[in-house]
Image: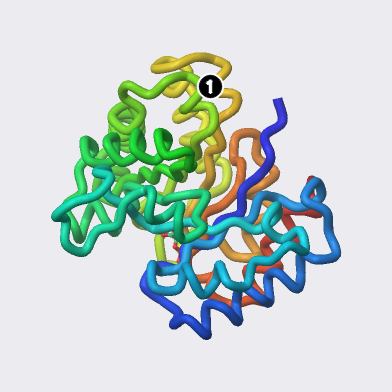
Amino acid sequence: MSRKPIIAGNWKMNLLQEEAKELFLAVKGYIKDYTKEQLPIIVVAPTFTSIAAVESCRCNCGCREKLFTSAQNCHWESKGAYTGEISVEMAKDAGCDYIIIGHSERRQYFSETDEMINKKAKAILAGGLIPIICCGETLEQREAGETDNHIAGQIRAALDGLSEEDIAKSAIAYEPIWAIGTGKTCDADEANRVIAMIRNVVKEVSSAKAADSIRILYGGSVKPETIEEQMSKSDIDGALIGGASLKADSFISIIDKTMKLN
Ligand code: 13P
């Protein structure tokens, strides 16, 4: 089956409200000449304080069907005494359709575990949003030949207890940690190999149907110069982009090149 590509910008802890709006409006200006059928699914993940600012730029011009907002994290509980956290309902209320979970920066700096990521995935899907579940290995794990085992373990844990239908609508982002923010993109064939392995794990834990439907993105130093080769591979369904999504020209170029490959 053909899976519609997702091009997602993870803005991380960058951009004040006016800067976020400016970038969003530039992307919106670019996509206005194209139909949603022509475009990949475009997602931007501003920091929490800029989600409302970005949302205020979405209107009834059709951009709501082409350009989606994501949170970068959430809590699995619906409300309560969890200082500093936001719930799925709050992200939805702010306008988000997607939520990134399990990013390696959250696993590494905020001690997020596979179990927490599984709880978040369940809460996101129960709330009607789409999780973008991140996984990835360190350089040490890669050099020790542990990549596949490590990633398969992260995916099995994240998807534990999810229905076939929920898995089918989810997205996964394979982001080797050594490729994030380093300028060292993972070789496209190797990224495709790992992503095909992830798809196989999805088939094992769920079904061939879920494995065929789930979108699996690559992330880690994606740039306009790398996207065409990455998108030409059989199992890579899009990109999760950090640095290159913070500048209108590079993010738009990535969208444009992806669209023209379709
Ligand atoms: P870079 O594109 O800056 O390497 O970041 C990738 C990433 O972590 C996206 O979530």
**Could you tell me which secondary element the residue under label 1 belongs to?**
helix
* 116 and 201: which is toward the camera: 116
Q: Is residue 16 left or right of residue 119?
A: right
Which residue appears at 48% of the width and 70% of the height?
A: 52
**Number of other residues with Cα within 10 Å of mark 1, as a class: few under 14, some 14 to 19, many 20 or more:** many
Which residue appears at 85% of the width and 65% of the height?
A: 33
Q: Is residue 146 left or right of residue 55?
A: left
Instruction: Give the vertical position of 188 relative to 183 (above or below).
Output: above
Looking at the image, the residue that sits furthest to the right is 33
Instruction: Give the vertical position of 179 relative to 123 (above or below).
Output: below
Instruction: Give the vertical position of 190 relative to 66 (above or below).
Output: above
On the rendering, which quadrant does ligand 1 occupy? Answer: bottom left
Q: Is residue 33 left or right of residue 88?
A: right
Mark 1 within 8 Å of ligand 1, using the beta carbon:
no
Q: Is residue 27 left or right of residue 195?
A: right
Is residue 192 in view from this perspective?
A: yes
Amino acid type at image mark 1: Ala
What is the quadrant of residue 123 in the picture?
top left
Which residue appears at 70% of the width and 50% of the height?
A: 40
Image quarter in which the C terminus is found: top right
Percent coordinates x, y for residue 201 in the rendering: 42, 23
Percent coordinates x, y for residue 78 in the rendering: 28, 45
Residue under label 1, please give it: 210
Is residue 145 in view from this perspective?
A: no
Percent coordinates x, y for residue 71 in the rendering: 42, 57
